[in-house]
Amino acid sequence: MEVLILITTESSRINALRLAKLLIQNKLAACVSIKRIFSIYEWDGAFEETKEFEITIKSKPEFKDKLIHFLHEISTYDVPQIIYKKYHTEMKYYDWLNKTI
């Protein structure tokens, strides 16, 4: 049994919560976890140090393309982080996820 885990980021708690709620309401995710992180990266030739919110989305593998499109539409970033992978899961969680979305 496989599930899709997709990780993205948002610049503020408000944006992260908005994204999470929209994903759940639109039945694109069964569960969304949010945690505060600190990121260092290069953007437009300058080093950035910023607080962000990492968003972990638990969904169905067949929703990958819909999720990517949705994130490109809703993200506040010009280039949103979209990292994903399929994971094996145990049957009870798999059943719950499939009943939820």
Image (cartoon, rainbow, N blue to C red):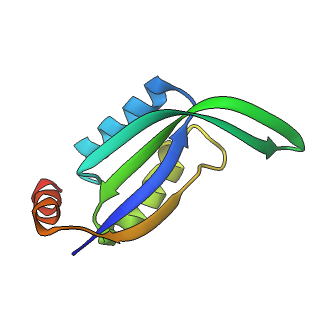
- Looking at the rendering, which quadrant does residue 20 occupy? top left
Residue pictured at 38% horizontal, 30% vertical: 17
Q: Position of residue 91 (x, y in %)?
A: 12, 68
For this orientation, the residue located farthest to the bottom is 1
The tally of labels here is 0
Percent x, y for residue 49? 74, 32
Tell me if residue 91 comes above or below residue 20 in the rendering: below
Q: Residue furthest front?
A: 90
Question: Residue 24, how many percent across, how many down?
Answer: 26, 44
- Taking the image as shown, residue 18 lies to the left or right of residue 74, namely left
Q: Which residue is farthest right?
A: 45
Q: 52 or 69, which is in the foreground?
A: 52
Residue 35, quarter of the rendered image: top left
Q: Position of residue 86 (x, y in %)?
A: 38, 71
Which quarter of the picture shows residue 21?
top left
Residue pictured at 57% horizontal, 37% vertical: 76
Left/right placement of residue 63 relative to residue 15 reads: left
Query: In the figure, is residue 23 to the left or right of 1?
Result: right
Which quadrant is home to the C terminus? Answer: bottom left
Indicate whether 7 appears above or below 89: above
Q: Is residue 63 above or below residue 34?
A: below
> In the visual, does 63 lie left or right of 76?
left
Q: Residue at x 10, y 62 (%)?
A: 92
Residue sitting nearer the eye, 35 or 84? 35
Quadrant where the image shows the N terminus: bottom left
